[in-house]
Amino acid sequence: MNWWNELKINCRFLKQFLFLNMKLKSVLGLNISDQKIEILSLSSWSKIKNFGEIILEQDIVKGGFILNKEKLIKKLEELISKTKIESKQAIVSLPDSKIFVHVFQVEKNLKGKKLREKIITEATKIFSLKPENVYWSYQITSIDSKMKEVLYTAVFKNIIDDYLEVLSEIKLKPVVFEPESLALGRILLEDSQNAVIINLTERTTNISIFYQQKLKRSLTKLTGENNFIQDISDELKISSSEAKDLEKIGWKEKQIAVILEKGLEELIREIKNILDYNFDLIEEIILTGRFSSIFGLDSYLSSVFKKNVVFKNSINKKLKLENDSSYHVVIGLATRGLNKKTNKEINLLPDKIKIKNLINKPKRNKIQVLRYAFLFLFLIFGAGLIINYVISLKQTPKNTEKIIPLEKQLTLNEAETEKEIAGETEEIAGETEEIKEPKENEIKKEKIDETDEPIISQISVKEDVDVLNVRSGPGTNYAIVTKIHAEEIYSLLEENENWCKIKINDQAEGWVFADYIIKK
């Protein structure tokens, strides 16, 4: 198997490794409202892996407060079992009606402890909250030359503590608690968009203002779909179920439109008050939630506010549900789980829990740590293969001469040797004739036996040279025929500048560099 095939196999293994490692990072979104629980997890490629919901009875949760922990635990266990979600880490939403939100500016140079003290001081002035009674969090949303803007959020401790108690019973570990409005902004807004999100639910309506995709203000009104259904029921003297069916008709029916417009008057006044602040900066108004799907509501509000009002019904084609708009919150929560910088965003999880999660993190992720270690070693191994291949290419001599097989080289060397011996024999014969006396001309000339070899000396490899290359010619550009070792003795056949031709055996000859041998 050559290095290229080995590298391809390792690349396939790396792909499998990364896939398995991504699976470990899956964090689920959990949205618990008064009416139902929604749970959803995304893959590392932002595709829906698991989704499920379960309806809650009226005596379990109300207005963000848990009324019956035992029933809520059973419902959560049933939902997790049904959806077969494996992840034990969750990002949990909190109703905006129970969260204090404010944006203010502080000096740019404030950091660490001084910054926290300044935030507590400013928050106490605005909300009259005692720090020991709330869990709070902040996020730096913008910085200019002198000041930086801080988003402050806080929630009463008893609300978070109740959720922590319930989740611990089902072995689910919350890593983030955040307002619903932030989850909606994450999934509904474009990059750096200035917009108002109106979340119309069964019991409440939340109005959130975003500048540059950063939350600036959040307001919750206790007006929701149930109020409009009740208005229709009272006005037309019909049951609530009949009124709910008529509500969906919306502005198709004039009588229903008049009732809805009257019910929306107070809510519209609140929204107008908010829009009066930097009205020109608002690019559009986004409707979401169950009530927002009523026919004609977006057109009616567009005419009232003189702004583009859009109803975002579906944001994920993979999630085939009857009304995707009612699941925006849980999708936004799960999306945060894919964000590597999630620790820089608002998180109302108590500090002691954050520290505990940080301390226990290596124990929970032993397999993940091992995979990262193996990945590091694999990358080093792959880099070594590539470097070794490149070096081998550079070290290979660029010989433009035709490469001759070893057997053929040995045959040619033998032929050249025979010619050289024959030439040397002729020279010796000539010299002999010249030194003979005249009287010896009558003596019969002796024939020179062609099989006799000339008198030659011997060489051996120096003791400090372990291995010496024997080449097919007098130069490093010639191919290596064989290798000889220290103290081995060979016959010297010929010398050419710094190279010596030796006889390796009866069939082979070659050239060695003269500096590494000793003549004898």
Image (cartoon, helix red, strand yellow):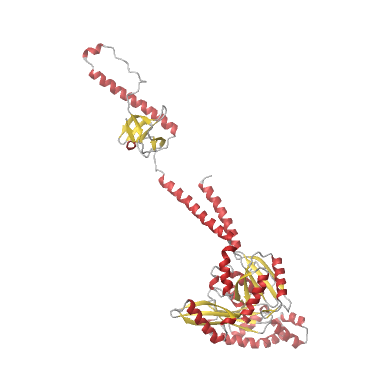
Along the horizontal axis of the image, is 520 left or right of 303? left
Q: Nearer the viewer, residue 368 or 188?
A: 368
Q: Position of residue 436 (x, y in %)?
A: 23, 17
State the count of labels: 0
Q: Nearer the viewer, residue 150 or 389?
A: 150
List the single residue furthest toward the left.
438
Residue 140 appears in view = yes
Could you tell me which quadrant the N terminus lies in? top right
List the single residue furthest toward the top.
442
Along the horizontal axis of the image, is 322 left or right of 509? right
Task: Identify the image quadrant of residue 448.
Answer: top left
Look at 38% across and 27% down and name the residue there.
415
Could you tell me which quadrant the C terminus lies in? top left
Tell me if residue 169 comes above or below residue 504 in the rendering.
below
Tell me if residue 518 comes above or below residue 338 in the rendering.
above
Along the horizontal axis of the image, is 423 left or right of 92? left
Q: Position of residue 320 (x, y in %)?
A: 68, 68
Q: Position of residue 185 (x, y in %)?
A: 58, 75
Residue 283 appears in view = no
Look at 55% across and 52% down and name the residue there.
10
